[in-house]
Amino acid sequence: MHESENNQQKAGDKMKQYLLIDIGGTFIKYSLADEQARKISGGKVPTPLTNMDDLLAAIEGFAAPLQGQFVGCAISMPGRIDTRNGIAHTGGMLSAFMWEQPFAAQVEARLGVPVTIANDGKCAAAAEGWTGALAGVENGLVLVLGTGIGGGIILNGKVLMGAHAAAGEVSGLVSDISKMTDDDFKLTSVERYSEAPLWAGMASASGLIFEYARQKHLPTGSPMPTGEEIFAAYNAGEPEAQKALKIFARRVAVGILSLQNVLDVEKVAIGGGISAAEALLPAIQAELDWLFERCTVMPTVKPELVRCRYGNDANLIGALKLFFEQNPA
């Protein structure tokens, strides 16, 4: 190849663009981005929770005006997602129809470009490990505190998928063994997670809201406060908010200690909407310090706590990183 042709080829490579999609329970966010996941354009549409045809039509709808501008599509979504084979075994809030679906191939048939799918927690971990708070970290953990707790594990520099594409589902960490051993115990829907003896109900953003409501003795059925309102009350010195955050932070710290005993990571990156609050990380750090001071018999080493670099864009960025792993240049 002549030098001029080589330069043209390099310029062409630099101009490659990708369609990044983050399927959430309420909205589908999408972005046309370059190879570093830098956004060129994008938007969002409501997520169809009805059937597969409606979901595929929604994706095709916003992708149609962008046809010819992207060479691949990377999708972040909830559920147990087999990225290597493009299979959505479950789909979180999409589970009315997203069971054992070859979803990557279905989207590929509509868009005409290579498509990868990946679990949203693993995408968040991939983003932070690529260019975010865990860049350069061989072993790390991402915890996204939202309605539940999104999780992503980086071991030996790679996002851990697991034998059944189910690694990192930290929402299911058991918080009360005695209740799980009751003969009447049953957990049959995602909506019941917050009520179950699981970490998801105790240490998610929802857990903080419920604890604050308990401290305030809010009547059942009354409007729930937002995370922003709770932290505003905390910053104003309200005793109930301060107590709620301390209890919540202790619950988060207990889960981190449990996970650290198994994973032995260098850093734990905390994300989710409430991670933007300045008071959150110091509160968790204080409780983690307290626990490690009292668990000296354990050989585990306290990990460093950091805030995730990428907020709402983490899933999109990480989806592209995992796309490249499945489609090396």
Image: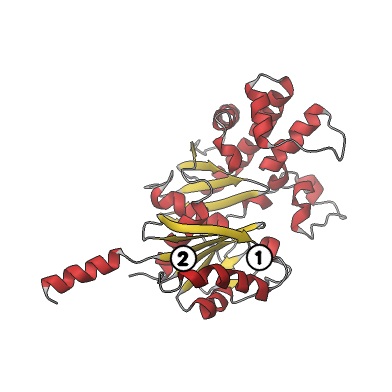
250 to 133, vertically: above or below: above
Q: Which mark is residue 138?
A: none
Q: If the image is split into quadrants, where does the C terminus sit?
A: bottom left
Comparing labels 2 and 1, the label whose residue is closer to the camera: 2
Residue occupying the point 72% across, 20% down: 239
User: What's the residue type where badge 1 is placed?
Assistant: Gly
For marks 2 and 1, give the CA distance. 21 Å
Mark 2 / mark 1, whichever is N-terminal: 2
Secondary structure under the numbered disc 1 in the rendered image: loop
User: What's the residue type where badge 2 is placed?
Assistant: Leu
Could you say where residue 91 lies in the image, as x and y percent from the top left? 66, 65
Residue occupying the point 55% across, 43% down: 271
Q: Are marks 2 and 1 in contact (CB under 8 Å)?
A: no
Residue occupying the point 77% across, 38% down: 224
* Residue with the mark numbered 1: 91
Residue occupying the point 46% across, 43% down: 309
User: Which class describes the residues within 10 Å of circle 1: few (<14), some (14-19), or many (20+)?
Assistant: many
Name the residue nearer the viewer: 59 or 260: 59
299 to 287, vertically: above or below: below
* Residue with the mark numbered 2: 19
**Residue 172 vs residue 62: left or right?**
right
Could you say where residue 179 lies in the image, as x and y percent from the top left? 81, 47
Secondary structure under the numbered disc 2 in the rendered image: strand
